[in-house]
Amino acid sequence: MKSYVYLFLSVILFTSCLNDDENINLETEANIIKYINDNSLNATKTDSGLYYVINEEGSGNKPTENSAVNIDYKLSFLDGTPIGQSESEILELKQIIPGLREGIQLFKEGGEGVLLIPSELAYGLSGNNTGSIPGGKVLVFDIKLNVADYLVENETAILNYIETNNLVATKTDSGLYYVINNEGTGSSYPTSNSNVTVAYKGYFLDGTVFDESDANGVSFNLNQVIPGWTEGITYFKEGGDGVLLIPYNLGYGVYGNTGVPRVSVLLFDVNLKSIN
């Protein structure tokens, strides 16, 4: 109910501000229903006003609102005008329009279908920043969900690596995995604010090295590095060494970094030289 109230108030406020030569072509639920009937779709409406069609349910997990997913999509208006399309697009659900965020969560991995997103769940009465989507437009997404949750995929890959390499690893509450080969002989552990010197080698699950220090290591503050390091180095005493297995959310995130692809698992061989 709240979404309809918001839409009504938005229309009143917007039209009261229009000049005589300004107008908006607001597409309504009636337009969505006509599209459904004209295309013989078996659509379901959610409480928010989103309409969706599941052509293939898929299997396995569904995403959550905090997931990063991989989809194929085609985007168009109700009149069939194409807006864009992409294959293997990685999206962080909390950063996309509400209708797409809600709709993707209705599919299991491998699922396919259609989302009919009213303007109040898309770009509202203002449209998008580039002007390619005018205000008031209903959006039609044909989607396929390739990966439902990269955190789940990352963890599966980490566990497979641990098993294949016969590692004895510990998982923390954050999702970090670490292996202690040598705890070290120092009298204390660093904290997340410590300045430390660490010799390291960074590589991917396939063994490809993307970064490496020399034997003397590099000095830095632990509160200025990726979260997996900020936490992981605190499990070693001075002189200790081991392995950090870091999922993407504790590494370089959804978007990656120079030399690090998006949503990548990172492995680091680390040797804590000193707590400075």
Image: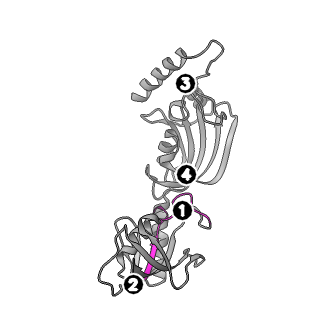
Residue at the spot of label 3: 28
- Write down the region rendered in magenta: 242-258
In the picture, which quadrant includes the N terminus?
A: top left
Residue lying at the far top in this picture: please name it. 20
Q: On residue 240, which mark appears? A: 2
Q: Residue at x 36, y 79 (%)?
A: 236
* Magenta residue check for 7: no
- Please give the residue where the numbered disc 1 appears in the rendered image: 263
Taking the spot 49% from the left edge, 44% from the top edge, the residue there is 101
Could you tell me the amino acid type at mark 2? Gly
Q: Earlier in the sequence, mark 2 or mark 1?
A: 2
Element type where label 2 sits in the image: loop
Q: Residue at x 58, y 51 (%)?
A: 144
Query: Which structural element holds mark 4?
Result: strand
Could you tell me if the residues under marks 2 and 4 are in contact, i.e. CB atoms within 8 Å? Answer: no
Amino acid found under the numbered disc labelled 1 = Val
Image location (x, y in percent) of residue 120: 51, 31
- Residue 273 position within the rendered picture, expressed as x and y whole percent measured from the top left: 43, 83
| Rendering quarter of residue 134 | top right
Disc 4 designates what residue? 91
Question: Which quarter of the figure is the C terminus placed in?
Answer: bottom left
